[in-house]
């Protein structure tokens, strides 16, 4: 649907559509509870501001904004696999959901809470058959609620066979300085170190950063807290449908190797990802659904 069609169908005093950033179409939603921008490419949340106008997410100033290419920052949707494809290195890392053009199906009030939400959809089609021959339907709800952003990815298996999924809501949080950030709640959890061939280790104390960190925490809590955020207040992420949390900061050397990442940008971000990663894959029976969700909000207590 073109901009005119989108404006005609969904436009309103709090909802606007634009061509940009780059060649992408995006929707901006304003509400007393906050604001959010979502690109149709990947149903990619680009920006979320609290009701006070504090920006919560980090978006690379060097990102590609081209249909079919991943956006660096915000909240990429990793689906139907997390990381490299298990057998075919030629397939895109983190699956194809973040590379696909999603359809906006509604903007309105959430069912059970005050706020405003946009619902995006993606269905299996010939373009996916070559690397994912399983009929599926994805529904992605981005909700601005009182004091939080809620993200929900519901996958339905439309095929006759069970299917095994992995994935993540790959949230890039903005931080003031990564070497002053703490992630709390993962103390004592085992994790797989992606920098050491998935060696299994145990987290001692809060997670701090003085080097590249790329870890899949296992069986952690539903709630993790992050201090030192660019929002100026500690934030927490409450996960649903996930028993693994991925924590990543590329640090200096990897940042320099990434063209869509400034050399110093590692200082201003940390990824805390609500995931089905590592052993936390999900097997979906025919017609069954799985929800992977996260609620991002300032720490209240
Ligand atoms: O966040 C975990 C991770 O798998 C890291 O290994 C790093 O590759 C990151 O995702 C970003 O992946 P991308 O494909 O977006 O560059």
Image (cartoon, rainbow, N blue to C red):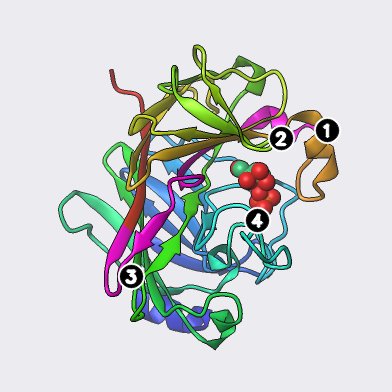
Task: Sort mark 1 into few (<14), some (14-19) or many (20+) by Cα contacts within 10 Å.
Answer: few
Please state the horizontal and vertical placement of residue 133, each as a whole percent of the image: 51, 80
Q: Which residue is mark 2?
A: 250
- Residue behind mark 3: 156
Secondary element at image label 1: helix
**Mark pair 2, 3: CA separation:** 33 Å
Residue 239 placement: quadrant: top left
The outermost residue toward the bottom is: 126
Label 2 or label 3, whichever comes before in sequence order: 3
Q: Earlier in the sequence, mark 4 or mark 2?
A: 4
Residue that numbered label 1 is attached to: 253
Residue depicted at x 35% and y 49%: 293
Q: Is residue 268 magenta?
A: yes
Separation of disc 4 and disc 2 at Cα? Answer: 17 Å
Q: Residues within 10 Å of mark 3 (few under 14, many from 20)?
A: many
Dividing the picture into quadrants, the one containing residue 253 is top right
Residue behind label 3 places its C-beta within 8 angstroms of ligand 1:
no
Q: Is residue 157 left or right of residue 249?
A: left
What's the CA distance linking mark 2 and mark 1?
Answer: 7 Å
Residue 123 shown in magenta:
no
Residues shaded magenta: 264-290
How far from the left and from the top, in percent, is residue 132? Answer: 53, 75
- Who's the residue at 72% across and 47% down the image? 61
Where 163 falls versus 84 (above or below)? below
Badge 4: residue crowd in 10 Å (few <14, some 14–19, many ≥20):
some
Horizontal side of 74 relative to 243 (left or right) equals right
For the view shown, which residue lies furthest in the top direction? 205
Judging from the image, what secondary structure is the residue with disc 4 in? loop
| Alpha-carbon span between mark 4 and mark 3 | 22 Å
Residues tagged 4 and 2 counted as in contact (Cβ below 8 A): no
Q: Is mark 2 within 8 Å of ligand 1?
A: yes
């Amino acid at each position: 649907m073109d901009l005119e069609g989108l404006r005609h169908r969904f436009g309103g005093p709090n909802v606007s559509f634009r061509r940009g950033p780059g060649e992408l179409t995006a929707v901006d939603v304003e509400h007393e509870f906050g604001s959010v921008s979502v690109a149709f490419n990947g149903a990619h949340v680009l920006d979320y501001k609290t009701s006070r106008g504090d920006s919560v997410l980090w978006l690379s100033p060097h990102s590609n904004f081209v249909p079919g290419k991943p956006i660096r920052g915000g909240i990429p949707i990793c689906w139907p696999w997390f990381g490299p494809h298990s057998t075919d290195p030629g397939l895109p890392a983190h699956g194809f959901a973040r590379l696909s053009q999603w359809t906006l199906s509604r903007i309105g009030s959430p069912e059970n809470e005050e706020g405003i939400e946009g619902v995006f959809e993606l269905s299996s089609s010939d373009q996916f058959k070559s690397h994912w021959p399983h009929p599926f339907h994805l529904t992605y709800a981005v909700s601005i609620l009182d004091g939080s952003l809620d993200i929900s990815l519901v996958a339905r298996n439309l095929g006759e066979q069970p299917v095994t999924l992995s994935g993540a809501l790959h949230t890039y949080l903005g931080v003031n300085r990564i070497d002053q950030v703490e992630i709390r709640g993962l103390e004592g959890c085992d994790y797989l170190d992606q920098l050491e061939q998935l060696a299994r280790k145990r987290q001692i104390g809060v997670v701090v950063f003085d080097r590249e960190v790329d870890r899949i925490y296992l069986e952690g809590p539903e709630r993790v807290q992050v201090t030192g955020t660019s929002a100026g207040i500690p934030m927490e992420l409450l996960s649903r449908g996930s028993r693994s949390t991925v924590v990543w900061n590329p640090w200096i050397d990897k940042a320099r190797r990434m063209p869509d990442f400034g050399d110093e940008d590692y200082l201003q971000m940390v990824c805390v990802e609500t995931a089905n990663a590592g052993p936390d894959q999900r097997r979906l029976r025919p017609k069954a659904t799985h929800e992977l969700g996260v609620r991002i909000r300032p720490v209240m207590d």
